[in-house]
Amino acid sequence: MYADQLMSLGIVKEGQIINQDMELDIIRHGLKVKHARKVMKEMAMSSGEWVTLIGLSPRSLQRKSDSDLLTPSQSEKTLAIRRVVDLAVDYYGDRSIALDWLKTPQVAFGGKAAVDYLDTNTGIQYVENVLNRLMHGMTA
């Protein structure tokens, strides 16, 4: 489910076989804060915007070192958000265009931006469904 994201964040080695149990172990143990910060930077988000998405207070993020661990919930949310970004990049073929799409209000989201839905698992699934429909030539 998150194999590509785990590899791109450098959590597992390129080409390493990852099964569901390994993913669960990594998530349950918690990602390092540096991985969340990497996704935040790649999305060109402020720490205030980012912490709202993963359920962390701004002050907590400031206090944490790169080697500190996120909770399992925050870890899973980080990987899921990264997967959405990867889907958008796959569809648009360009990271900056994909990020613009994620941050720009869309008719498919009732005039809201896709990023506004990334704070819940249901919202993440909704954005993934819209992207998958776009990829398959369906109207979002």
Image (cartoon, rainbow, N blue to C red):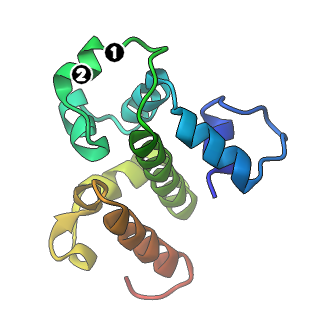
Q: Which mark is residue 60?
A: 2
The image quarter in which residue 45 lies = top left
Image height of 17 relative to 12, above or below: below
Residue at position x 37%, y 39% in the image: 43
The image quarter in which residue 106 lies = bottom left
Label 1: element kind: loop
Question: Residue 57, position in %: x, y?
Answer: 19, 30
Q: Residue furthest bottom?
A: 138
Image height of 11 relative to 136, above or below: above
Side (left or right) of 129 relative to 60: right
Asked whether the viewer can see residue 4, the reply is: no
Asked whether the viewer can see residue 7, the reply is: yes
Question: Residue 23, position in %: x, y?
Answer: 66, 47
In the picture of the structure, the residue carrying the numbered disc 1 is 64
For the residues labelled 2 and 1, say whether their Cβ atoms are less than 8 Å apart: yes
Residue at position x 47%, y 53% in the image: 80
